Image (spheres, rainbow, N blue to C red):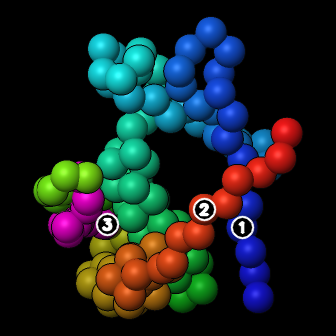
Amino acid sequence: MPVVSVSLMNVPGTEAAIGWAGGHCLIADRPEGRAGGMGLGFNGAQLLALAIGGCFCNDLRYIAHRRGVGIASVAVKVHLAMEGDPLIATGADMVVQCATEDGSDPAALIEEAKAGSMVGCSLPRGIPVQVSVGQG
């Protein structure tokens, strides 16, 4: 079974965290002035919306490559609805614009990506999240 691991740690002198996987990193923080946040990076809701849209974009490219279809452009907007206390995501709407290099209709590519997007398919099913306390 494949496993993906990421790591996060505080950014010295701030209350933000830097997260990394392999050679890639990002900053997670709260908006400036909120709970010590300095607005240095993405908040959790933004990270979740980016995961939904980013996974979809990647899967769309995988499918296009497999089918031998060139994609000229992709634009994705994700709107994440939230409510409650604690605040939880209650739904996501994604708007996809895609143009193929040969001008063919991208609808089949988009539908296949929708049906097979790891993040997009995992969230509606829910996943357990276990939290434990590490040493050191």
The residue carrying mark 1 is: 4
Q: Residues within 10 Å of mark 2 (few under 14, many from 20)?
A: few
Please identify the quadrant where the N terminus is shown: bottom right
Q: Which residue is mark 2?
A: 131
Q: Nearer the viewer, residue 119 or 129?
A: 129
Dot 3 corresponds to which residue?
99
Near mark 1 (Cα within 10 A), the count class, few <14, some 14-19 or many ≥20, is few
Q: CA distance from mark 1 to mark 3?
A: 31 Å
- Give the dominant element type of the magenta stretch: helix, strand or loop: strand
What is the CA distance from the residue labelled 1 to the residue labelled 2?
A: 16 Å
Q: Earlier in the sequence, mark 3 or mark 2?
A: 3
Instruction: From the top left corner, tell me how far across and down residue 21 is, in percent.
Output: 73, 50
Residue 12 pos. (x, y %)? 68, 15
Amino acid carrying mark 3 in the image: Ala
The residue that appears at 40% across and 20% down in the rendered structure is 37
Asked if the residue under mark 3 is in contact with the one under mark 1, i.e. CB atoms within 8 Å, the reply is no
Kindly tell me whether residue 75 is visible in this rendering.
no
97 or 8, which is in the foreground?
8
Q: Is residue 70 left or right of residue 111?
A: right
Query: Which residue in the rendered view is the most extreme toward the top?
Result: 13
Pinpoint residue 43: horizontal percent, then vertical percent: 39, 38
As measured in the structure, the alpha-carbon distance from the residue carrying label 3 to the one carrying label 2 is 42 Å
Q: Amino acid at mark 2?
A: Val
* First to last magenta residue range: 87-98
Q: Amino acid at mark 1?
A: Val
The mark nearer the N terminus, 1 or 2, is 1
Image position of 40 (left or right of 85): right
